[in-house]
Image: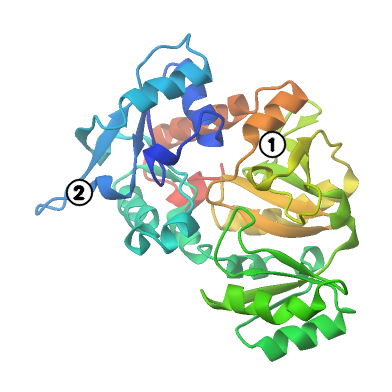
Amino acid sequence: MLIAFFVNDMAKEHPRYTTTMLAHEAVRRGHRVCYITPGDFVLTPDNILRIHARFAPEKKGRSFVEFFKGMEAVADKTEAIDISEVDVLMLRSDPSLDAQATPWAEDIGILFGRAAAKRGVLVLNDPDSLSHAINKLYFQSFPEAVRAETLITKFPSDVKAFAKDHDGKIILKPLQGSGGQSVFMVGSENATNMNQMIEAITRDGYIIAQAYVPEAAKGDIRFFLMNGRPLRIGNKYAALRRVSAKDDIRSNVHAGGKAVAVEIGKKELRVAELIRPKLLADGMFLVGIDIVGDKILEVNVFSPGNLHSCSKLAKANFTEPVLESIERKIEIAEESPGAFDNKTLAVM
């Protein structure tokens, strides 16, 4: 089958990104792979959807690093094909990266993902549901039992009142954004700077204020879920603990955090079970959730990262069950043509 990976920008991809791992595993299993970016879609006058795709060299024995070098070599070499030639379109872009510099590209994957799904392409995750998840307001749709108490506002007075209700210790971050950008912890030692923190975030939109969860001092747990359930191989889970760098509350690995092995227990499995119905209802095939204690702080449904680190720490290739699941979905679609819509098939 042909799997197309939609990314923000070829120049911003990395050999250890989850997208690279998935694409490399697909090639290793004998599938064709191509990459597309926001400017690569074409809708013709006769309503034909086409893409300008960069095809991966089909060499199964290459390592993921060699595979990535091969993709770099074809970054500027595209071939126009009909979307009907694509079996699976994986939407792996981060809309927040386009929001400021190229706002026209922010929801392109969603818009053309819908068009592709209508033409029989399996789109993962489901583009209709992704349209509701383009900012962190989507997080509020999950069960209250697993969410840290949260306020969303643009009024500084609201934030200050919320801080007072939580003994002055809260987390501030933007409604739109990712990767630990503009995330602050307010406490007694920096309370006098709260106005500047609020101003820095609200300059670009709404602000999220969250109650501080004490377990955050130990870092958070990135936990992958597939088809609504924990991604696992035997008794090994696709998960890791991200520990913040010294003097930095952000545990994101590319923001200075460190990835270490973690044991998944009843608490984390209970959190996953509580959010499972929502993920299934929304057709969210592959998701990364960030857990602190018994709460989720983030639900990444666009481009969850760290799957390579999870595999390395667990000594297990978690891309294998992901590709196996995709292969099975295509089999189901062929066995029962037109029987299931994209959202349903996405989590089968």
| Mark in front: 1 vs 2 | 2
Relative image position of residue 230 (x, y in whole percent): 72, 41
In the displayed structure image, the side of residue 242 where residue 118 appears, left or right = left
Q: Position of residue 249 (x, y in %)?
A: 77, 56
| The C terminus - image quarter | top right
Q: Residues within 10 Å of mark 2 (few under 14, many from 20)?
A: some
The label on residue 231 is 1
Q: Identify the residue shown where x is 30% and y is 53%.
A: 115
Q: Which mark is residue 178?
A: none
| Residue 162 appears in the rendering | yes
Which corner quadrant holds the N terminus? top left
Q: Where residue 229 sits in the image (x, y, percent)?
A: 70, 43
27 to 332, vertically: above or below: above
Residue 331, compared with residue 120, is above or below; it is above
Determine which residue is flagged by label 2: 42
Residue ranking furthest to the top: 61
Badge 1 local density, few (<14 within 10 Å), some, or many (20+)? many
